[in-house]
Image (cartoon, grey):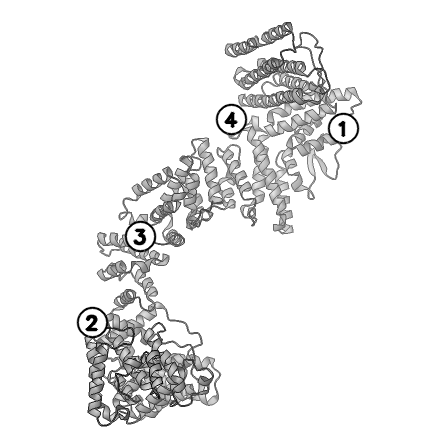
Amino acid sequence: MDLGPLNICEEMTILHGGFLLAEQLFHPRALTELTKSDWEHVGRPIVEALQEISSAAAHSQPFAWKKKALIIIWAKVLQPQPVTSSDTDTRWQEDVFFSVGNMIPTLNHTVLFELLKSLEASGLFIELLMALPAIVCCAELERFLEHVSIDTSSEDVAFFLDVWWEMMKHRGNPQDPLLSQFSAMVHKYLPVLEEFPHPPKRLRSEPDVCPTMLLLAMLLRGLMQIQGRILGPVRKCCALANLADMLSVFALTEDDPQEVSATVYLDKLATVISVWNSDTQNLYHHQALAEKVKEAERDVSLTSLAKLPSETIFAGLELMHALLGEWGEELQAMLCSSQGTSYDSYRLCDSLTSFSQNLALYLNRASLPEEERQVASELAVCVRDFLRKTSRVLKNRGSQDITASIAMAIIQQKMNRHMEMCYIFASEKKWAFSDEWVACLVSNRALFREPDLVLRLLETVLGASTTDRAVPEPQIQQVLHLVLECYTDLSLPDKNKVLAGILHSWGKRGLSETLLTYVESFPEDLNTTLNKLAQSASEQGLAKAVASVARLMIVHPEATVKKICSLAVVNLGTHKFLAQILTAFPALRFIEEQGPNSSTTFMVSCLRETVWAKFSTPKEEKQFLELLNCLMNPVKPQGIPVAALLEPDEVLKEFVLSFLMLDIEEVDLSLKIFLQTLEANACLEEYWLQACSPFPLLFSLCQLLDSFSKYWQLPKEKRRLSLERKDLAAHILELLCEILLANAETFSPDAWIKSVSWLHRKSEELDWTVGLRLKTFFEGHFKCEVPATLFEICKLSEDEWTSQAHQGYGPGTGLLAWMECSCISSTLSERMLSLLVVNVGSPEEVRLFSKGFLVALVQVMPWCSPQEWQHLQQLTRRLLEKQLLHVPYSLEYIQFVPLLNLKPFAQELQLSVLFLRAFQFLCSQSCQNWLPLEGWNHVVRLLCGSLTSLLDSVRLIQSVGPWAQGQEQDLTQEALFVYTQVFCHALHIMAMLRQEVCEPLYILALETLTCYETLSKANPSVSSLLQKVNEQHFLKSIAENISPEGRRQTLLQKISSF
C-alpha cells in the first residue's frame, strides 16, 4: 500500500469504483445535487469502498489510508474547475491531487459531511479541518453547522457532539506530510475560489491564524441551534460535558494553568479506562490497552493557549444554566439509577466538578459586570446542587487497579509524559519485580539512563531486599544488574549525581550493607581493578579508569576511596593519576550528618582513617603531601570534568591546627602541609583563610615557636621536631602574617582590632622573642615589648619599644637580649646593629663588649636554628667590619711567624678563632652539662655549616679577591695558611667533644685537607720543598692527637698523600 505520493493505486481503483456505483444509483442527477435524504440510498457504495480499503490494509495502516482517501475527497470538493485547457495542463503539473481527483466525480459538501458521519470520523474531520487555511477552515465549519441544522437527526446530533469534543482535544501534527500537502494545495486554490463568505475581521487582518476560539464560538452557536433536537440522557450528558469542558478550559482557567502532577494524571487515566472497561457500550471497550491509553490521554489533557471572547463565555454560561434547568431532573434520575456507570455519565460529573471548581476561582478573581456575575453565581449554585445529588457516580467509578499497566503502556509506547511515568514506575515498590515490570524495564532500559531514575530504581531494589516480601534472589540480581548497567551508561556528571544521592541516602558504605549478598565479588573486584590501575597509571587511560572506579564507587564509596588513598601513598608515582580519578567525583565532597565530626567531609575522614599518621617512609609522606595538593588543586585532564575535593581551609583545620605542638609526632608533616597549602592557594581570588580561624592558627604557630625556647630542657620524647624545623615554622608565621595583613580589609575594623588584641594578649604568655616575630603585625596597635636591659645597650625609641620585666634578664643581660633580637631576621639584625651603643674610640669598651659578645654567643647558639645562626654569622661579620668586635688571634697553631699578607683573610681567621673560643667555653666545666647528646650534635652541625661557608669564602677570596689585583704573586700561600688554621681549630674542637658527636667535624677536617691539597698541587712553585715537608710534619703532629684510631689513620694517610 502506498501512503506516499498521491498516485493511482489499487486502493484508488476501489474508491473510484465506489463513486461510479454511487453515480449510477443517483443517475440521472449528478452527485453535486445530492441531499441528506439521498445519502442513505446513494452513499452506501462509497462507504463500503472505504471499508474495503481499510479492511484490506488492516494489517498495516488502515487509519492512514482512510485519512488519505478523505483528503482526496475534500480536495476534490474544494478543487476549482479548470476554465481552459491551459488551466488543465497547469493543474496536472502543480496540483498533487489532480490525477487522483479526476478519478472521482465532482461532489458537493453534503457527500463529504455525510461520508464523515457514516464513518464516525469526527477526529479525522477536525484534523483535516484544522489543516485548512483559516478563512477556508471557518467557512467549512459554517457549512458543516448548516448541514447539521437542516433535518437534524440523532446521528447528526451525535456526530456534532463528537466533532465539538474532538475540536477541544485537537493538538495538531505539523510533521504530517499529507496534511502539509493538503494545506498547501488549498492555499493555491484560494485566489480562484469565490464561494467563501467574508471572514471575520480578525481573520482578514491575520489570515493564517488558527481560529480555534472562533471555531468553538461557532460550535456553541451550533449547539444553540440544535439543542431542541438533543434527545435521550446519553446525548444530553455529552452536550453538557462538552459545554462544561469548553468553559472550564477555554474561559475560566488562569492564563498559565499548572499541569497536574504525574500521579494525578495517571489516576485520571486509570479512572477513564476503568469506566471504559465496565461500559460495554463504549466505543473503546474492546480496544487494546495501548489504544485506550492514547485516547484517554487526549480526554484528560485539555489545554488552551487562548481564551474565548467574553460574549461567548457569557452566552455559554447562560446556556448551561438553561440546559441544567431543563435537563437536570431527567439526568439526575438516570445518574442515580441502579444502572452501572457509563462513560458519558462519569464524564458529565467529572466535567461539572472541574467546572464548579474553576467557576468559583473565576468569580473570586475576575472583574465582571453585575449581570454576568449574577448569571455565573446562580449557575455555580445550580451546578453544586446537581453534583451533590449525583455524587454516587464519581464514588462508584470502577475498582480495577490498572495504574501499573497504564504506566507501563505509556512507557512502552513512549506516549505523552512517558518520562514522568518512568519516575513513578521506578518508585512504586508495589509494582516492582512482577514479570511485566521486569519486562518493561528490560525493553525500555534506555529511558532509565537518568540519575534520578537510577537512584529510584536502586531504592526500590534495596527496599525489596530488606522487606519480608518474597522476591526471588535471581530476580533481584537481574534487576540490580540492569540498574547498574543504566548507571554505567550515564555521563560522568550524571554518575556524580547518582553517587551524591547514594551518599546522602545510604551514607559512606553505599549499597554494600544491603546488597552485599548480591555483589559478593566486590572486595575482589575492588582489589583487582585498583591494583591494575596503580600499575598502569597513564593519562591516556584516565577515562577508562574513571569508568571502572565509578561502578565500585556506588557499591561501597568508603572502601573504594580508602583503597585509592592507600595506593596513592604507597605506590610511588601513582598519586597524581589516582588523585585525578578521585577528583572526577566531586560528589565525594560529602558531609556526614551523624557522628562527632559532623562538619568533616567524607574525603577528609577517608584520608585520616586510612593513611594519616601511618607513613612508613619519607617518600610516603611526600606522596601524601602531593596527593593533598592534587585534591586541592586538581590537574584538569582533557575531556574529563574534575573538581577540588579538599578546600585549603579544611586541610588546615584537619591536618594542621591540631598538630602544631612540639610533642606530637605529626608536627613536621603538618608544617609541610601548612606551607604547601599557603603557597599553593595564595593566588586564589577568594580569600579562604577567613574560614579556618586564622588568628588561632597564628597563635598555634607562636606557641610552637615558644616551645623551641625551652627546647633542650624538654625530654626527648617531647621533642618530635628538630631545631632545624624552627625555620620552617618561622617562615610559615611570616607568610601567614603577610597574607592576613594583605587581606585585613575583609575583616570589619572592629573585628580586626579585637582579633589583633586577642593575639597580643595571648602572646604575652609566651617568650618575648615570639612577640617580636609579630612586630609588623602589631605595628600601629602595640609597642614591641623587650627586656628592660636591652635599653642599656641600645638607643630604642619609646614610641616603638617598651620595656618589660622578664625572668632571667637581670643586670648585664642586655647583650644577650640584643643577640636574641638579632637572630630573628636579617631586617631586625640590621636594625639592632644600627641601634647598638658601643664607643669604638674606647678600647676598654670594645674589649668588654667583645667578652660579653662571646658569652652571649655561647648562651644563644645551642637554641639557634640554622637560619638564626646564619643571621648571627652575618651580624658577627658586620661587627668585625665596623671594628666593634675584637677577636685576638693567638699563635698556638703557628710554628713560626709567617711573612704573609693575611689581611684579605682577617675575617675568616677571626671567625675560626671565635668559633674555637665559643666551643672552649661550651665544653668548659661550667657549661658542659647544658646540653643532651642531641644538643651537642646540633651545635656541631651549626659549627660545621659555618666552617664550610668559611672555606667557600677563602676559595673565593683566593681566586677572585680584589687584594690579588696588581700584586706580583697571588694569595695562594695565605690561603694555604688559613686552611691549616681551620684544620687545627676543627681538630682542637673535636678533641674537646665526645667522639659520638664528632663525625661532621671529622668530615669537615677531611674536606679542609682536600682544599689544602688541591690548592697546593695547583700552584707547585709557591712553596719550597722544605717548607712543604715542614707543613706536612706540622699537620701530622696535630692529627696524632685525634681518636679513635680509624679517624686518626685516615687523616694521617690524607696528609701523607700531599
Task: Give the residue at mark 1.
Answer: 837
Task: Give the residue at mark 3.
Answer: 484
- Count the marks: 4
Sequence-first tag of 4 and 2: 2
Secondary structure, mark 2, is loop
Residue 387 visible in the current orientation:
no
Q: In this view, which residue lies farthest toward the right?
A: 841
Q: Quadrant of residue 929?
A: top right
Sequence-first tag of 4 and 3: 3
Secondary structure, mark 1, is loop
Secondary structure, mark 4, is helix
Residue at 70 percent across and 44 percent down: it is 780
Sequence-first tag of 1 and 4: 4
Q: CA distance from mark 4 to mark 2?
A: 95 Å
Q: CA distance from mark 1 to mark 4?
A: 40 Å
Q: Residues within 10 Å of mark 2 (few under 14, many from 20)?
A: few
